[in-house]
Image: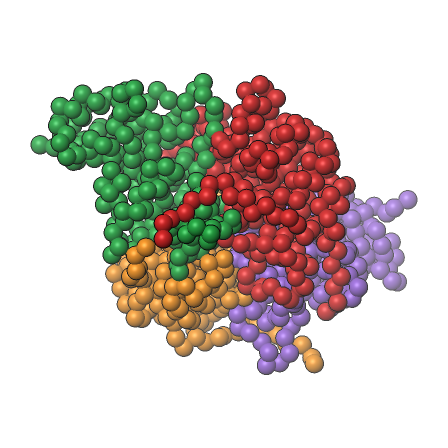
Chain colours: A purple, B orange, C green, D red
């Protein structure tokens, strides 16, 4: 899945990767491409994790992980960072999700009744970034579909998701869910069965 | 021109805050996670015993670190933050009703503070449209897209952390320890900065100042920085 | 007049001086005071004019004059400069005027029928700076009063002037014009005669 | 990580602009007076012959300098500026109706451009309340004070001037030549920067970048800078 997500990145892209699985996409980026990673706490040109002993407490990513810089790195304030995000300058954001609806609504920050941790920068990212890709398991641990007719959880953004990549395939979201690719050994029937809304297939 | 005498430097954090603090005041505190936190000033606030604080800060620290120290003593009454997931004590106090909480999207929080410091009472953003964040907020359509109105934020006091400063209060931050510090510096009625090093005027390059001295009322040299790391992550050689 | 205006500056003040006569106030600032001058094109800590041959085309003030830096100078963008002004961080602005009304309305940017040059940063300064002092001749060249009941020229700001310093005296503006000081050899009667609105005198 | 290949550097100003320009487009041009002007890019626009331009720039240049060059050739149809007092040709074209003019207070202009680049469609400011500037604008009261709504500005193209850059487009400006350049860099659909020196990635301090490379689409090394001074003012020894 991370490999497949990495293939959405084009040469020259500026990309923000969400916390968790999306962070791992960085490991799959093709060497020949010039991809610049943004971290919303105030950094463009995010490098890999440091070697042991080389960590710097003043250099962390949005997930509070220690990271490193690159030759073309720049640092800036949170206000400048979100001006960059809100202003549509980031080409691509890859995030996790709890639910995505057929109209592109995204829920990924809050489950009522459980402790509210906060939305962090997720609402800003989905509202501002040019293309939003959701990377998630196709179904919840209890088997419930995460691609749904309409979200039951509080939203992170309305009509913001462009593409969904799951263990079952790649989906375009544009008022309806259209399958672009099936994962290996996955059938149309399995996708239909495990999805909470109608799935269109190309002719 | 005159030989200027600068009067912004204080001998320690408690001294720098002593005639500023009052119960019920609003305090902005810089930092992201445990990175770029005004550690010495937070400890001084804890020692002062000031209470019923409204705190504006991206996170709420962890247990024993950052604003976590003021949660232990029950000095915080309300927090405006974007994410507090690292602090179990916060969860407990929130669920028991001891503390009020207002979540802002991180970028909206940063921009509200920037607006407060820049004399902008309100602005429109697409962030949060159609979500709980838009509740009770004015919605306006520009170019067929909906935006919500968010207001500027200011504070009675901003406490921030920088790397270096000069006597005039010009500041430079280091790496991602910059984060919310520069905007909060502009939005406090009084702003107190703690730094790792104080230089003479003329020792910083004027093209490279992150926060001009006009925003800084008081300066204190911090000590005993914890260099705490929340999520140590390393790669294989 | 410039000397008198310079006495309005307090130790530690951040000050913006307008183009023309207000610029000259800098020459009268008492040496013992720590006064920092802002130039709205993006500089805090403005120094004196350069010696001949030491001018730098990248270092000018808002009047496009060559200037110098000081040890505590900082440079920033126009957006950051006006954030500073609009946000109320500048203590004092001293500007010229065509007319000031008793309610503190200021007209200093436009004479209808003549070429419109533009307001530059004047509207931002009077709306944002904590205290606005007008420094001007008490009367126009044709003798017409410049302190008036209400301005006839297009406004730069409404209710923005706090103090007026003219060749005849120093005036407080607070819904009415109150004289604080008479200049040497100036009588109450002369002030009354040359002012276009009622002048209050202290008891 | 990968060995990046950077593709932003163009051999000359005309080449950097050739497939971008079109009649009737909106162009933002950095600079304050003659300070920090993208001189080479303005000359390239003049040579291109593109017409009916809407230009957003604090000033309109002087005769023979800056945007004055595009006034001579009649390429500008409308200008949004805060002050054009230095240019007699502008006056002539304005009075004869050849050119439209929209005045913005300088700080409002800067903030409108910052908002445009930051995805903020509108904001409120006290600047211009009760003046001609407030005409036809929404007025709103916050804390008993009136403010007017101003909208964000963007452009089809921003042309800016910086001092140094690296291959990734990270920029550094020099002294007051910074002015409108950093905000305009953020508000162009395409932004082209001319610089005095192009460095390799890694030669600039990442803490000291004024404009991150994300905002810069194309870079050209400028030449023959005039170092023109509008108001040479010196003091006695």
Q: Nearer the viewer, residue D87 or A127?
A: D87
Question: Measuring 27% from the left and 40% from the top, which residue is drawn there?
Answer: C2
Q: Nearer the viewer, residue D35 or A169?
A: D35
* Residue B111 sits above or below residue B89 on the image: above
Q: Is A121 positioned to the left or the right of A132 in the image?
A: left
Which quadrant would the N terminus of chain C be assigned to in this image?
A: top left
Residue C149 image position (x, y, % from top left): 26, 21
Residue A160 image position (x, y, % from top left): 67, 46
Which quadrant would the C terminus of chain C be assigned to in this image?
A: top left
Quadrant position of residue D142: top left
Q: Nearer the viewer, residue B47 or D98?
A: D98
Q: Is C192 positioned to the left or the right of D34 in the image?
A: left
Residue B228 image position (x, y, % from top left): 49, 74
Q: Nearer the viewer, residue A190 or B216?
A: B216
Question: Measuring 75% from the left and 67% from the top, which residue is drawn there?
Answer: D3
Count the labels in the image: 0
């Amino acid at each position: 899945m991370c490999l497949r997500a990495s293939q959405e990145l084009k040469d020259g892209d500026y990309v923000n990767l969400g916390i968790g699985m999306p962070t791992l996409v960085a490991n799959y980026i093709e060497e020949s491409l010039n991809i610049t990673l943004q971290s919303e706490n105030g950094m463009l040109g995010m490098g890999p994790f440091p070697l042991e002993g080389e960590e710097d407490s003043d250099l962390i990513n949005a997930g509070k992980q220690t990271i490193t810089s690159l030759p073309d790195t720049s640092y800036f304030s949170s206000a400048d960072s979100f001006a960059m995000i809100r202003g549509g300058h980031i080409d691509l954001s890859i995030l996790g999700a709890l639910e995505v609806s057929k109209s592109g609504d995204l829920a990924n920050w809050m489950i009522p009744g459980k402790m509210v941790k906060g939305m962090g920068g997720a609402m800003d990212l989905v509202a501002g970034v040019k293309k939003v890709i959701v990377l998630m398991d196709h179904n919840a641990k209890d088997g419930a579909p995460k691609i749904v007719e309409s979200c039951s959880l509080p939203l992170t953004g309305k009509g913001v998701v462009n593409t969904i990549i799951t263990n079952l395939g790649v989906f375009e979201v544009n008022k309806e869910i259209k399958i672009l690719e099936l994962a290996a050994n996955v059938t149309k029937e399995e996708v239909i069965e495990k999805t909470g809304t109608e799935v269109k297939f190309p002719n | 021109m005159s030989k200027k005498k600068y009067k912004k430097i204080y001998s320690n954090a408690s001294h720098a805050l002593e005639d500023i603090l009052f119960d019920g005041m609003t305090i902005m505190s810089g930092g992201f996670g445990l990175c770029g936190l005004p550690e010495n000033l937070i400890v001084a606030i804890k020692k002062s015993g000031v209470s019923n604080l409204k705190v504006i800060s991206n996170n709420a620290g962890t247990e024993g670190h950052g604003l976590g120290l003021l949660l232990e003593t029950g000095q915080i009454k309300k927090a405006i933050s974007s994410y507090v997931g690292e602090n179990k004590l916060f969860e407990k106090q929130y669920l028991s009703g001891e503390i009020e909480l207002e979540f802002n999207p991180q970028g909206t929080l940063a921009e509200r503070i920037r607006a407060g410091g820049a004399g902008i009472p309100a602005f429109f953003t697409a962030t949060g449209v159609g979500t709980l964040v838009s509740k009770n907020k004015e919605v306006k359509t520009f170019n067929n897209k909906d935006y919500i109105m968010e207001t500027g934020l200011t504070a009675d006091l901003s406490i921030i952390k920088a790397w270096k400063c000069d006597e005039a209060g010009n500041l430079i931050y280091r790496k991602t320890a910059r984060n919310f510090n520069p905007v909060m510096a502009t939005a406090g009625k009084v702003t107190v900065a703690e730094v790792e090093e104080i230089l003479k005027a003329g020792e910083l390059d004027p093209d490279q100042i992150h926060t001009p001295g006009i925003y800084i009322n008081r300066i204190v040299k911090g000590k005993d920085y914890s260099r705490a790391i929340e999520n140590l992550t390393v790669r294989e050689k």
